[in-house]
């Protein structure tokens, strides 16, 4: 069975830091189960210059075949024109690859129902089974659920959250077209019993230091500045907490501007703040934490929920997270985490203080989160997706 996966940003450094990492891990699992996976991706201007070498290494190691379109030259266009132009280039490339490899299934991942139309064309013209996974959804016209009508020729539309499925149903998308299937992580890679003492020593933390962790890019939409505003409120009650910011360097003006803003604010709390930049071992980082904060402001994450949320759950950590769509499907307030109104630094501070004051509560919540994370294990999800591919192929032969 030959599968063409169409997805943006499958290259370093994006492959290490965002939700796309989970999508790629899913492709590797499918390859191991028995599918022949081909990946088509757009190469953007800020891609690591070593991306070609990375493709070669991954092809040898995983057996996955990579195909790409370099859209770096489109940067001179306006944002809207760049969007249209880059998406238009996919169609002829898929046609070329389909004629060469004769795919059984074409599976596209995106954040816009607008692209349902493009995926539908694959079915209509190429006579192959096509699926579209709506990982999240943009705002405005591009994210309008009314654009589901492009799904008429699709075999399936996969929603990564129940909210997305409900949204599409409300707009009249046929129920037989929609499948809820989240994108997960390999829960076995995360072990809450991992010894973090050496890591604490390297960071010059006291062994009894309580660590409050947040992971992700320095962006306002991630709620990073909501957490910053909550810090002095927490430190009024607990002076021996370390707030650990783990982030990644992106070659963009927004990153540099936000980083400068963050560093300027945090100079007031130098004794209680640590910032780690670069590609860190997320397993060790999670093992180090006592509390994980996910202060997201947007109503959804890259996968419908933040990848960090699943990683924290699988690590058995006490979680404080924004009460937003996607997150509140995974977190039940007071049971496997604490939810707070997004953007509310006062309520965020109260939740952090509540967990900081009780080790027993942290362990209880973390233990429940770890059990619940198994529902999103990538090994389970990959088998369900493979089974769907098999069913689609079987129905096409009848």
Image (cartoon, rainbow, N blue to C red):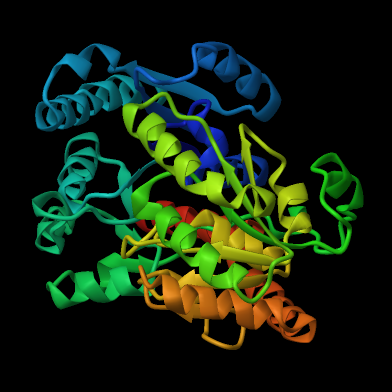
Relative to the observer, which residue lies in front, 70 or 237? 237
Q: Where is 387 relative to 266, above or below?
A: below
Residue 96 location in percent, x, y? 29, 19
Q: Quadrant of residue 363?
A: bottom right
Please report the residue visible at 52 percent of the width from the left and 86 percent of the height from the top: 333
Residue 293 location in percent, x, y? 56, 64
Q: Where is 264 relative to 212, above or below?
A: above
The quadrant of the rendering that contains the C terminus is bottom left
Number of numbered callouts drawn: 0
Residue 141 location in percent, x, y? 8, 52
Please report the residue visible at 33 percent of the width from the left and 27 percent of the height from the top: 253
Farthest-out residue, bottom: 334
Q: Where is 305 relative to 42, above or below?
A: below
Judge whether residue 172 can be spotted in this image.
yes
Please report the residue visible at 82 percent of the width from the left and 51 percent of the height from the top: 205
Relative to the observer, which residue lies in front, 100 or 14? 14
Relative to the observer, which residue lies in front, 16 or 36? 16
Judge whether residue 375 can be spotted in this image.
no
Q: Quadrant of residue 178?
A: bottom left
Residue 52 location in percent, x, y? 52, 12
Q: Is residue 24 left or right of residue 242?
A: left
């Amino acid at each position: 069975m030959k599968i063409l996966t169409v997805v943006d940003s499958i290259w370093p450094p994006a492959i290490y830091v965002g939700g796309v990492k989970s999508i790629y891990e899913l492709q590797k699992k499918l390859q191991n189960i028995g599918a022949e996976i081909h990946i088509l991706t757009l190469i953007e201007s800020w891609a690591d210059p070593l991306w070609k070498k990375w493709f070669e290494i991954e092809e040898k190691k995983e057996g996955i075949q990579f195909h790409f379109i370099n859209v770096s030259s489109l940067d001179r266009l306006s944002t809207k024109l760049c969007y249209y132009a880059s998406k238009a280039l996919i169609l002829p490339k898929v046609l070329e690859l389909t004629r060469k490899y004769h795919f059984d299934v074409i599976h596209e991942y995106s954040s816009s129902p607008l692209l349902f139309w493009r995926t539908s064309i694959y079915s209509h013209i190429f006579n192959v089974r096509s699926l579209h996974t709506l990982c999240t959804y943009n705002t405005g016209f591009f994210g309008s659920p009314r654009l589901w009508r492009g799904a008429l020729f699709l075999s399936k539309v996969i929603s990564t959250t129940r909210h997305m499925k409900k949204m599409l149903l409300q707009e009249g998308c046929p129920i037989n077209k929609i499948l809820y299937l989240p994108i997960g992580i390999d829960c076995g890679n995360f072990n809450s019993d991992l010894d973090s003492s050496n890591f604490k020593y390297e960071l010059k933390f006291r062994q009894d230091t309580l660590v409050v962790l947040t992971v992700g890019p320095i962006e306002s939409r991630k709620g990073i500045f909501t957490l910053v505003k909550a810090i002095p409120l927490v430190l009024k009650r607990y002076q021996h907490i370390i707030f650990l910011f783990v982030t990644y360097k992106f070659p963009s003006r927004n990153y540099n501007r936000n980083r400068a803003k963050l560093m300027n604010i945090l100079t007031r709390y130098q004794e209680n703040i640590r910032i780690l930049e670069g590609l860190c071992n997320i397993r060790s980082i999670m093992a180090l934490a006592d509390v994980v904060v996910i202060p997201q402001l947007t109503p959804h994450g890259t996968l419908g929920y933040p990848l960090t949320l699943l990683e924290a759950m699988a690590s058995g950590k006490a979680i404080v997270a924004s009460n937003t769509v996607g997150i509140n499907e995974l977190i039940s307030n007071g049971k496997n985490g604490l939810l707070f109104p997004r953007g509310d630094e006062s309520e965020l501070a109260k939740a952090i203080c509540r967990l900081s004051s009780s080790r027993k509560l942290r362990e209880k919540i973390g233990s429940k989160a770890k059990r619940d994370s198994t529902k999103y294990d990538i090994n389970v999800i990959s088998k369900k997706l493979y089974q769907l591919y098999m069913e689609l192929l079987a129905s096409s032969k009848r």
